[in-house]
Image: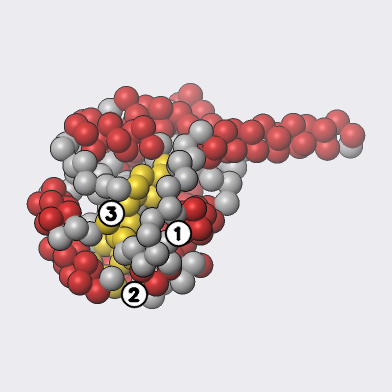
């Protein structure tokens, strides 16, 4: 029994160190904005970057090494959120952090080959012309996001925070509001997953759920976001509402 408990502690501490390291290495610098600043904050993967095919391929590529199943076609995962997406591969909870890191490493090497969603450059350009403050909060790394944005000439963002957290996006958004002197009522968070909606709701932030990413419109609607965005041009409307 003693050996079993000791092994469990070792596994827990290992996962804690891995997750904490990933979180803290991407912490943002403290730069408060003037009171009353309004901002549209975007998720990255599935909202700005069409990265799902690259993630799917990387998961299949690492399956034999880590010993989990492969999925033949990405269409079989349609409508699932990220946690359900990973469950379909039958990855054990012990292996999951290591698989996620391996997949990230593979996708990172291809970051400039991943494309932004159609029309987004034009939309972001128009938002910036209206002097709307724009931010990104993502579980991807800050360096990857910056490299992607620079490569595709999408340097429109005033704030970028990336990196996984033990505590989820809700806690990251709360810290962002506090550190940058942003009021929840002056922020709209834009994402493509149910967890993005939940993170915004935890912080009383309005959420716009986009339908061109991971989840279907029906799945997103069940979580009651403030807005459902079907067409990218509708993002311009958010600048008038905020």
Horizontally, residue 35 falls left or right of residue 111, namely: right
Work out whether residue 194 can be spotted: no
Camera-nearest residue between 70 and 134: 134
Query: Would you place residue 76 above or below residue 21 in this image?
Result: below
- Residue 134, disc: 3
Query: Would you place residue 50 above or below residue 37 in this image?
Result: above
Earlier residue among tags 1 and 3: 3
Q: Which residue is drawn at the image coordinates 45% and 42% (left, top)?
A: 28
Distance Cα–Cα, label 2 vs label 1: 23 Å
Residues tagged 2 and 3 counted as in contact (Cβ below 8 A): no
Q: Label 2's element?
A: loop
Camera-nearest residue between 44 and 32: 32
Camera-nearest residue between 104 and 25: 25
Earlier residue among tags 2 and 3: 3
- Residue with the mark numbered 1: 181
Q: Nearer the viewer, mark 2 or mark 3?
A: 3
Q: Nearer the viewer, mark 2 or mark 1?
A: 1
Residue 187 locus on image (x, y percent): 36, 65
Q: Dividing the image into 4 quarters, which one contains the C terminus?
A: bottom left
Q: Which residue is drawn at the image coordinates 51% and 33% (left, top)?
A: 25
Q: Label 1's element?
A: loop
């Amino acid at each position: 029994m003693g050996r079993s408990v000791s092994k469990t502690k070792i596994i827990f501490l290992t996962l804690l160190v891995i997750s904490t390291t990933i979180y803290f290495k991407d912490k943002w610098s403290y730069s408060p904005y003037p009171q009353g600043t309004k901002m549209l904050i975007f998720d990255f993967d599935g909202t700005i970057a069409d990265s799902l095919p690259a993630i799917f391929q990387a998961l299949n590529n690492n399956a034999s090494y880590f010993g989990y199943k492969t999925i033949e076609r990405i269409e079989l995962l349609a409508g699932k959120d990220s946690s359900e997406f990973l469950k379909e591969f039958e990855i054990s909870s012990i292996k999951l952090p290591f698989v996620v890191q391996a997949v990230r490493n593979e996708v990172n090497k291809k970051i400039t080959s991943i494309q932004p969603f159609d029309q987004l450059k034009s939309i972001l350009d128009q938002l910036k012309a209206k002097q709307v403050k724009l931010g990104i909060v993502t579980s991807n790394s800050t360096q990857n996001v910056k490299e992607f944005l620079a490569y595709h000439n999408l340097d429109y963002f005033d704030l970028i925070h990336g990196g996984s957290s033990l505590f989820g996006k809700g806690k990251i958004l709360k810290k962002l509001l506090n550190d940058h002197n942003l009021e929840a009522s002056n922020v709209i968070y834009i994402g493509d997953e149910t967890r993005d909606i939940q993170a915004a709701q935890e912080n009383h932030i309005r959420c716009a759920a986009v339908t061109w990413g991971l989840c279907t419109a029906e799945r997103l609607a069940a979580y009651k976001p403030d807005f459902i965005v079907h067409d990218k041009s509708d993002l311009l409307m958010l600048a008038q509402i905020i």
